[in-house]
Structure formats: C-alpha cells, structure tokens
Image (cartoon, helix red, strand yellow):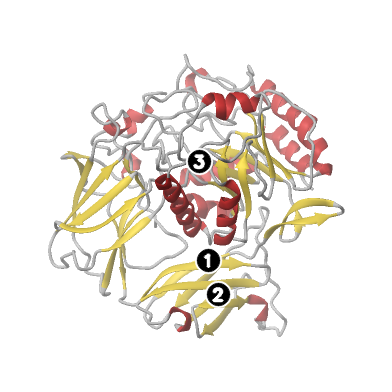
Amino acid sequence: MKDTYCTLITEAGEQGKHKDGWKWYPRPQMKRDGYLILSEGWTLDGAPIHIPFVPQSVLSGYSGEVGERLIYQTTFRIPDTFDKERILLHFGGVDQIAEAWINDIYVGRHEDGYTAFSFDVTDAVRRDADNELTIQVTDTLSKEFPYGKQRKKRGGMWYTPMSGIWQNVWLENVPANYVEGITLKPDLEGVHITLERIGCVEATICGFRAVVTLHNGETYEQTFESCQEYLKVTDHVCADGSIYQPRLWTPESPYLYSMKIVTDTDEVETYFALRTIDIRNVEGVNRVCLNGEPIFLHGVLDQGYFSDGIYLPAEPEEYERDILRMKELGMNMLRKHIKVEQEAFYYYCDKHGMLVMQDMVNSGGYSFLRDTALPTLGMKRMKDTRKIGKRRKELFRKHVEQVISQLYSHPCIVAYTIFNEGWGQFDSDAMYDFVKKLDDSRLIDATSGWFWQKKSDFDSEHIYFKTRDLTVKERPLLVSECGGYSRKIAEHCFNLKRSYGYGSAGDEKALTDMITDMYRKMILPGIPKGVCGCVYTQLSDVEDEINGLYTYDRKVCKVDKEAMRKLAEELKL
C-alpha cells in the first residue's frame, strides 16, 4: 500500500475522480453565489500539478531538502458573472509561509500552515484579460511554527511531511460593503449573531435582516439595527398561534437551522444549531452536559491522515464516511488531533451530530525522554517554566486565535486542547485564560496527558500499556488518550517491516476483546465517580502505526461492530 501516495499524487496529479473531487464549496457556513475554484492549469516550478493535492516531489523532501521555495503559478480569467465591486482571493491552507502576486503585483503574505486566509485582489486583477497568479511558499519545517507530526525523516509516530498548497484556492466576488465574517453563538432558544462588515462606517450600528427556516417549515424573519444582535427563535408565533418550540442539536438528532443574512448591500447563506456545552454538578458529581443533560464523551483520536492524499482524502465525502464509520461503532466524539481540517470535515460533523474536541497544532521541540518516556513511567508533574522564544509564543498565540475564529460558529466544536503531552508547552494557565477569553462557550483541556498546571476544565490523562483504577478529584476526568492496540492486516499495511501499536491482537475478536475489556475494567467503574469521557487511539492506522479501528485505506474495519455498539450503550449516562 505504500505506493498509494505515488499513484494519486504525481507531478501531473490528474488521477480520474480526484481531478474534480475538490470542486466543493470551500466555506459552507458562509455561502455566496459568486465564486470560482482555481484547481486547473497550475504548475509547480514549471511542472504541471493539480491543486489542492501535495506533489510527490514535496512529499519526498522536494529535491532532497524540505524548505526550498516552491513557486506555484496559474492563469485565470474573471467570470462574466462577477458583477460586484470587490474580488477576494482565498486559501484554505498553505504550509508554512505563503506570498502571493497577481500580474506581478504583490497582494499579501500569510504565516501558518494550518489556517485559512484571504487577500483583497481587486486592484491587481484584470477583468477583461488573463491574470497570472504566482504563489511562493517557504516551508523549513521550522519548529517556531505549528508543524504537527511532520518530520522529513518520517517513521513511527512521525509522519510524511508536506509543503505547499494543500487546500483549495478560490476567488470570491463581493460588493464594496460586504460581510467579512459571521460569528454565531447559540443557546437553547436562539443565537447571538455578530457580523464583521467591510465598508461600514461604524460596525456597531450597521443593521441586517436575518431569515431563518424553522424545522416545521415556517420562516422566521427579524430585522436588526446593529451588527451584534440576538435572534430568539422562541419569539416566533407559528401559523396555528402556538409559540415555536425549538429543536436542539444532539448526536442523535443534529438539526441545523438554515439562515440568510441580508444587509443593504450583501447577502450570505449560513446555518446554526441550538445547543450548549458546559460542566454542571449532577447529584454531587461534576458532569459534562450537552444542552443541560449529562453526556459521556465517547471519543476516538482522529489524526486526519489518508492513504490517498496524506493531509486530504481524495474527495471531501471521505470525511463524511469517516464520521459515519465512527458513529456506526457508537462513538459520539472525534478528538481532531494536532491538525486543523478543511471546512468540509467540520460541516459533516455538524450535519451528522459528531462532537469535536479540536487540538491546537503544536510547535516547539520534542524530547522523547522528557515528553514521553518519563511521564509514561509516572513523572507527570513539571513546572511550566521552559524558556520559550518570543517569536514562537507570538506565532502560537496567533495560531490559536485564528483557529478559534475560523471554527467558532461550528456547533460540532465542544472543546479545545491547547497543549498535548508537553510538546511546545508554555504559560499554560495564561493560555487557558487567553483561550477562554476568545471563546467562553467551549470547554478547554489545557494540558492533555500530563504536565498539568492549575487551570483546565478537565483533569486529563493519557493511559497506555495498562488499566488502572481512576481517581477523580473535583474536575471531571477525561481519559484523553488510551488503548492504541494494534492489529496488522498485511495487505492493508503501509509498512510491514516497521509497524507498531501498544499491544498486539491477532484477529477481530482478540482486538475487540482487548478494547472492551479495557473500557469495562477501567472506564465504566470510573463513570459514577466523575470520569466524563474517553478518547481511544485511534480512528485508523496512520503509516507505521497500526492501532486504528480501521486500516489506513479504510477498507477494513478491524473490530466487531456489534460489540462496539453494545459497549457504547453501556457508556451512556
């Protein structure tokens, strides 16, 4: 299976269905009619390449050295349908530093390989002729930037590195005074709406109209005088004279309300859900509650690697299939581990009621002895006093801010992980306060695994190689990683000679028994005491790691589905 990368991601890059697989609207929570996805006619240093897939030359280190500058170029024409004043150039993700020119006019720079960005290119484009777009990308795998699990010499828990453009590039046509962003913060009766408007003299007094489609088929419309308002759906009087009863978003019934935002110059389609997530004392035990009701976070680690596209699947619908695979096994949460996904992933989680705990992407150096070996042996306390450079701190805070801004309005997001197992960890209590100020509507695992400080919404532990009695203190206890049992299936294995996991099973029954025994011996007895969730490692095999519930190519489920569903029922509160 190792050659899969080379069959999909070649210098030419056109492989059947993959050629058009990502002509999918890139921003489902903020849709307009005027857009153009730039997926055709690209070259990388003169050689043809298909965007958004990473080229084989970059995967192998690009001429032997990760970090050389990559020069992407394409030519496009502005569609006749672009009849509004402004044109924006959007990028879903470019690793690590991107600079852009249109017709030799410099239009902007972005630093961070995992967050979306855009430039206003109105003054650089020609509306009646071809336009030349040049993107220069620099990726040194600098540890000052968030870099995740990429390493040039991949192997073990380090994976194939990628550089360059790895998400969609697209144009959008907007009016002179347009809505740049929409922030949606729900409760159980309505949604707080904040618009960021470009061209508005005073953002606080520029109004808008909201048109919501209710689940009973009726339309509820309100007009507001400012850009920060609360839309209360329970104010709606139905056609039969009754007060509208809202439909809440849950994993079992993930209802999404469609909404149109109309200003004096702009019109945008979006959606929201009615739901809350918090911690409440329930019969003397602190519990995570969804919509005020206790819920057990039955999660799985999801690293977002794919055998046919590394950082992207061959088509966006594969995200949906992954989510449905986990729901079929009874899971209700994915811990999106040290990666920020394309918007399609979060949309499908919203649509199918999959909770998401979103990790920030780690920066900084890693020490096997300090960050893994000693904590695994029990040395899980360490003062948060490492010397961290000012530049790295600034880049990480900016990354955190951008991730939260980008994902804020997705109902699936219920929690954030700031630091994982000490990698890049600094000023954890101050970072907890920083994240809470940016988003007080989600829960925070400040230090996942170990090296805990004072502030976090969970006590968070990683437990491998054993089961043990769990001690719960005042905060809910989240077993944020565990298990990782391996089962090798030779014909679906990335690397037969160097594969690993945390304990080995020979067949489906053996692996299923190992997993269910761990839950019944360690997790289930802890739930009455306040164990609030468990994240099993992991959704699928990833390169050398063969501890997935599915193989890397997603062709084989390695566990007994019925037994996993039965276990999920036992975990429900």
SS under mark 1: strand
Residue beneath the point at 58% across and 27% down:
372
- Residue 286 visible in image: yes
Which mark, by number, is residue 338? 3
Relative vertical location of residue 506 with respect to residue 319 in this rendering, above or below: above
For mark 2, what is the residue? 212
Tell which residue pokes out farthest to the top in this image: 497
Q: Which three-letter amino acid code belongs to the residue tagged 1?
A: Tyr
Residue beneath the point at 41% across and 44% down:
315
Relative vertical location of residue 254 with respect to residue 531 in this rendering, above or below: below
Q: Nearer the viewer, mark 3 or mark 1?
A: 3
Q: Which three-letter amino acid code belongs to the residue tagged 2?
A: Val
Which mark, by number, is residue 271? 1
Q: Position of residue 180 (x, y in %)?
A: 39, 69
Relative vertical location of residue 420 with respect to residue 237 in this rendering, above or below: above
* Marks 2 & 1, CB-CB < 8 Å contact: no
SS under mark 3: loop
